[in-house]
Amino acid sequence: AVPILVQVYFNSSLAYGLMWLLKVPHNVASPGALIGASNFFELAVAVAITLFGPGSPAALACVVGVLVEVPVMLSVCKICNATRAWYRRRLGMPAPESRLSTC
């Protein structure tokens, strides 16, 4: 599980950081970071089950990969949402208005 953690966080940070340096808008950079960090485990599970059967160790390894990757990708998504203001400042955009009612 540790190699998956390192790979996802490294790849997403690299993609997200480079897009920040290149002044790519947040609505493009955030999905780009998630896509760049993806392992395409859905495809791996399908191939492992097709080639080795559903009870094989290869299929089990792929399923464990998915179980580890999902919470990690959700944490990357949370980080991207939390740093949205960095992108707005870099592009010289005003801070978004609060969605809370003032009534």
Image (tube, grey):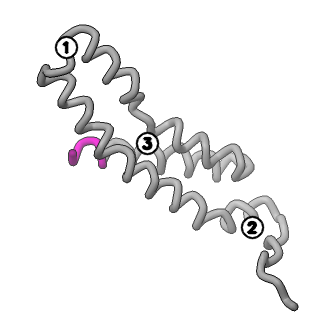
Image coords of residue 72 (percent x, y):
38, 51
Q: Nearer the viewer, residue 48 or 85?
A: 48
- Crowding near pointer 2: few (<14 within 10 Å), some, many (20+)? few
Q: Residue furthest right?
A: 103
Q: Residue at x 57, y 58 (%)?
A: 80
How far is mark 3 from mark 1, CA to CA?
31 Å
Quadrant assignment for the N terminus: top left
The residue to which callout 2 is attached is: 89
Q: Earlier in the sequence, mark 3 or mark 1?
A: 3
Q: Main secondary structure of the magenta part?
A: helix
Residue 53 numbered mark, or none: 1
Q: Nearer the viewer, residue 81 or 59?
A: 59
Q: Amino acid at mark 1?
A: Gly
The residue to which callout 3 is attached is: 11
Position of residue 63 in the picture relative to residue 27 (left or right): left
**Dots 3, 2 in contact, CB < 8 A:** no
Q: Nearer the viewer, mark 3 or mark 1?
A: 1
Q: Residue at x 41, y 28 (%)?
A: 40
Q: Is residue 20 magenta?
A: no
Q: Secondary structure at mark 3?
A: helix
Q: Amino acid at mark 3?
A: Asn
Q: Quadrant of residue 96?
A: bottom right
Q: Secondary structure at mark 2?
A: helix
Image coords of residue 46 (percent x, y):
34, 18
Q: Is residue 77 above or below residue 86?
A: above
Q: Residue at x 51, y 61 (%)?
A: 79
Image coords of residue 62 (percent x, y):
25, 29
Q: Give the residues drawn in magenta, as a range.
A: 1-5
